[in-house]
Amino acid sequence: MNRIDHQHLSLESRGQSHAVDEHTTPYSQAWLNAYWMPYTGNRDFKAKPRMLVAAKDCYYTTSDGRQVLDGLSGMWTCGLGHCREEITRAIVKQCSTLDLSPSFQYSQPLAFELANKLVELTPQGLDHVFFTGSGSESADTSLKMARAYWRLQGQASKTRFIGREKGYHGVNFGGLAVGGIAANRKMFGQSIEADHLSHTLLASNAFSKGLPNHGVELAQELNALISLHDASTIAAVIIEPFSGSGGVVLPPVGYLQKIREICTAHNILLIFDEVITGFGRCGAYTAAQAFGVTPDIMNVAKQITNGAQPMGAVLTKADIYHTFMEHGGPDYLMEFTHGYTYSAHPIACAAALAALDILVRDNMMEQINALAPHFEQAVHSLRGTKHVLDIRNYGLACGITIESHPGEPAKRPYEIAMKMYEQGFYVRYGGDTIQLAPPFIMTRSQIDSLINALGETMNSL
């Protein structure tokens, strides 16, 4: 295979030339330092860059020409595989027709077409769609929507939110407050009023296949928090049906149903953050459908465009939408003083429609459900592997808890991920976990090669 000299191409156009050698780092520190990378150990990366320059189907191509099997679907985003021609064509066509339209006071037809497609694919009753640019924006939009809804209902004291330990709701200030990953929060201090339920990662459920059987009683903690704060102060409960970034923490059987019952009984909105679980990861279009629980508000992003364009959305029940419409004043005034320049961006809408069309046309939910048992069997074959403390899975998602170095819980997962990359496999490391989310189109043999490499890597440490 010919090596792809991405650095040479980019610098040659600026009158510079650097030859690429797979055994050396061709990138100057000055060139690398201009980019402050997100969620990255910048010093480590810039000492030994890991550059990806192309992707197709289930593989990335590195700057030195190696093929790397994608074990996380990009960032939980590219379930249909990379660089799908149908999505590429839709983006190119739209970019050459209407690149951007104003999203305030004006719009374009694809926004309405996509909104109706999302209503069609998500649980009955989620009838209205507000577009955002990301999962983080979706989280903050849903929180603002919930607070504003209660103010319009004459219950302005309902301002507090209940999140969950190990929950992840993006990095904007609202989502950070309701999120339950301590490392994400400690640098920034308090933002909005939030309390947290316990996570559902229990020792008694170690090595569960699918939803765990123990822990439904943890849902009763919500009643305790309601007693502590009073329902008159709580706007909404926001949880992921199962957490992704927290390490694929699954709800015990009946847990989400009990949370729904408690919220309904105490007049508290329930928000599902389905940024990771939405559009296939669970073997259904949403986790709400997979688990049989419908929230009042649902946040989505990532898989909505197969990762080809940034986009998110918030879906709501009719009562919430109509409350804003009824209290909006004269028709020409805005009912919800919130939005983004790139809400319902035409190119993102085109990408999303193409991606969702593939999900439906190719009966992708059937393919996912057919592949999931093999994936489950493969990941649980790692039980007994060196340093593995727990394995849990649902659909095409898996979290593996790794035994910690003393005082350094994140070190060994980092070491595993780096050794996997050297061998041609991309997996995610976060906290004390390794996380897997293969593309929906991955073959059984590719899954086997991924898991075999992971087992060999962990045993070699």
Image (cartoon, rainbow, N blue to C red):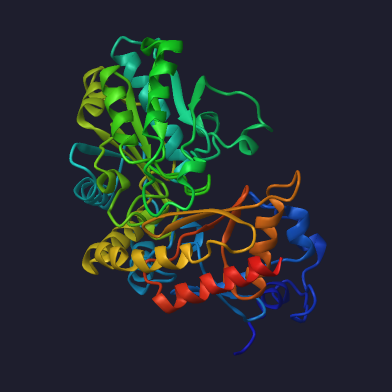
* Quarter residue 376 falls in: bottom left
From the viewer's perspective, tell me whether residue 345 is left or right of residue 207: left
Q: Residue 184 placed where, x, y %?
A: 62, 38
* Quarter residue 291 falls in: top left
Q: Which quadrant of the figure contains the N terminus?
A: bottom right
Q: Residue 2 placed where, x, y %?
A: 62, 89
Using the image as rendered, state which of residue 205 and residue 393 is in the foreground. Answer: 205
The number of numbered discs placed on residues in the rendered structure image is: 0
**Compared with residue 253, is residue 389 higher up or lower down, i.e. above or below?**
below
Using the image as rendered, state which of residue 13 and residue 292 is in the foreground. Answer: 292
**Looking at the image, which residue sits at the far bottom?**
1
Q: Residue 76 placed where, x, y %?
A: 46, 56
Q: Which quadrant of the figure contains the C terminus?
A: bottom right
**Compared with residue 190, is residue 206 higher up or lower down, i.e. above or below?**
below
Q: Is residue 39 visible?
A: yes
Q: Residue at x 71, y 77 (%)?
A: 8
* Quarter residue 45 falls in: bottom right
Using the image as rendered, state which of residue 186 and residue 31 is in the foreground. Answer: 186
Q: Residue at x 66, y 30 (%)?
A: 188
Using the image as rendered, state which of residue 382 and residue 147 is in the foreground. Answer: 382
Q: Residue at x 74, y 80 (%)?
A: 22
Q: Residue 164 placed where, x, y %?
A: 48, 32
From the viewer's perspective, tell me whether residue 314 is left or right of residue 165: left
